[in-house]
Image (tube, rainbow, N blue to C red):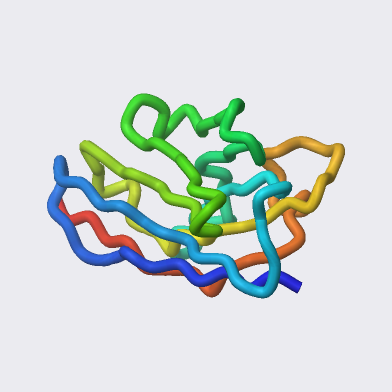
Amino acid sequence: QVQLVESGGGLVQAGESLRLSCAASGRTISSYGMGWFRQAPGKDREFVARISYSSYYTYYADSVKGRFTISRDNAKNTVYLQMNRMKPEDTAVYYCAADKGSVGSYYLSTNYDYWGQGTQVTVSS
C-alpha cells in the first residue's frame, strides 16, 4: 500500500509560482508512473501532468503546457509539480496519484491506483 501526501498549496496572485510536492510512504514509487490531477469547484477532476517511472517521459494537459513542470526524485520517494505564470483558472484542489502499471490512457483518473488527499491552490486575479 502506498500513502501519498501533497503539500505546497496556497494562495498566490496571477503570474506567480508555486511548487507542489507529493511525498510517498509505505513502499517505493520508483517503478510507478506518477500523475497530478486537479478539481475545481463544480467541475470534474482533470488531468494535469504525468511522469514515467524513469522520468524519461512527461505529459501535460494543453492548458498547462509550457507553464507547469512535473519532476520526481526517486531517492526521496517524492514527486513535484512546479507551476509558473499561474492563472486564476488554475484554482483547484490538486491531487497526486500513483499508477502501478496500467495499460490504459495516462490521462484517465481510473488508471491510477493510489491518491493523495489533495492540496488547495488558489490564484487571485
Work out which residue is located at the far front of the displayed protein and give it.
Answer: 75
Q: Residue at x 60, y 72 (%)?
A: 25
Q: Nearer the viewer, residue 39 or 1?
A: 1
On the image, the x and y values in percent for residue 62 come to 47, 27
Q: Is residue 114 above or below residue 54?
A: below
Q: Residue at x 79, y 52 (%)?
A: 100
On the image, the x and y values in percent for residue 70 come to 45, 40
Q: Nearer the viewer, residue 41 or 92?
A: 92
Q: Residue at x 53, y 53 (%)?
A: 75
Q: Quadrant of the N terminus?
A: bottom right
On the image, the x and y values in percent for residue 78 come to 50, 57
Q: Is residue 30 left or right of residue 121?
A: right
Work out which residue is located at the far right of the displayed protein and give it.
Answer: 103
Q: Residue 29 sits in which quadrant?
A: bottom right
Q: Nearer the viewer, residue 18 or 45?
A: 18
On the image, the x and y values in percent for residue 83 come to 31, 43
* Figure label count: 0
Q: Is residue 104 left or right of residue 70?
A: right
Q: Is residue 32 left or right of residue 65?
A: right
Q: Nearer the viewer, residue 73 or 2?
A: 73
Q: Is residue 62 left or right of residue 27?
A: left
